[in-house]
Amino acid sequence: MTLAIFDLDNTLLGGDSDHAWNDFLVEQGIVDRDHFRRENDRFHRAYDAGTLDIHEYLAFALEPLTRHSMAELDELHRRFMKDRIDPIILPMGEALLEQHRARGDLILIITATNRFVTGPIAKRLGVEHLIAVEPEMEGNRYTGRVAGTPSFREGKITRLEHWIKAHDVSLEGAFFYSDSQNDLPLLERVDNPVAVDPDPVLADLARQRHWQIITLRDRDERRDSL
């Protein structure tokens, strides 16, 4: 059984679910509009530049989860899915997932976005297996802290190695689809790295290394670097 690993944001989605969730919180009046939007945009720029401090970002991103009960958060997420995620699910991404299912491959989404945000998205895409940042919980409330290693950059490899051991599967022949230079450590680890609508840094490296480069977007949605 071949493992087909997918990044989520800007790969299977035509946008970033983490950034979209934070914007959604601003729109709902749950966080301070000016400060939160300014910081959200700052962290997003750092991610795109490959300079993100993941621990600083997660302290920012997970704090709003501590303010609400799970029932309140689940209701917010239902509205978030309808308003912000359903419109950016890429049909060609769903078709690619279906191609791997038809081949009998084992599909895994691995993302630096937290499980609260991404769990329902993976379910909507019909993907059972998800590696995501794990927000710590005490009782039935989020603490604002991270449990374990964040699945970001080299952390994706750490988390994947634990997952592979637990599920008794192999990386031999594995595919990894990603748009981001931040995923270079894992792209370099698999037999079949695929750059999907890549950022400029990843696009250049993919061409130099003769990696496959594909698009899952309509022409007017594609990155200029493709």
Image: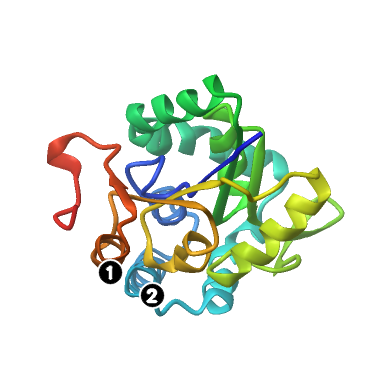
Dot 1: few (<14), some (14–19), or many (≥20) neighbours within 10 Å? some
Residue 204 location (% of width, % of height): 24, 66
Instruction: Give the left or right position of residue 73, taking residue 35 as reference.
Output: right
- The three-letter code of the residue at mark 2 reads Gly
Residue 134 seen in render: no
Q: Which label lies toward us, 1 or 2?
A: 1
Residue 102 seen in render: yes
Vertical arrangement, residue 132 with respect to residue 182, above or below = above
Quadrant where the image shows the N terminus? top right
Q: Return the mark for residue 201.
A: 1
Q: Find numbered disc 1 in the image and state the secondary structure of the residue it sits on.
A: helix
Instruction: Give the left or right position of residue 145, taking residue 125 as reference.
Output: right
Q: Return the mark for residue 22.
A: none
Instruction: Give the left or right position of residue 216, taking residue 115 as reference.
Output: left
Q: Find numbered disc 2 in the image and state the secondary structure of the residue it sits on.
A: loop
Residue 208 location (% of width, % of height): 26, 66
Vertical arrangement, residue 36 with respect to residue 194, above or below = below
Q: What number of labels is visible?
A: 2
The residue sitting at 19% across, 45% down in the picture is 222
Q: Earlier in the sequence, mark 1 or mark 2?
A: 2
- The three-letter code of the residue at mark 1 reads Val
Disc 1, disc 2: CB below 8 Å? yes
| Closer-to-camera residue (14/223) | 223
| Closer-to-camera residue (171/136) | 171
The residue sitting at 53% across, 56% down in the picture is 190
Dot 2: few (<14), some (14–19), or many (≥20) neighbours within 10 Å? some
- Residue 130 falls in image quadrant: top right
| Closer-to-camera residue (27/84) | 84
- Residue 146 falls in image quadrant: bottom right
Residue 80 location (% of width, % of height): 47, 38
Q: Return the mark for residue 50.
A: 2
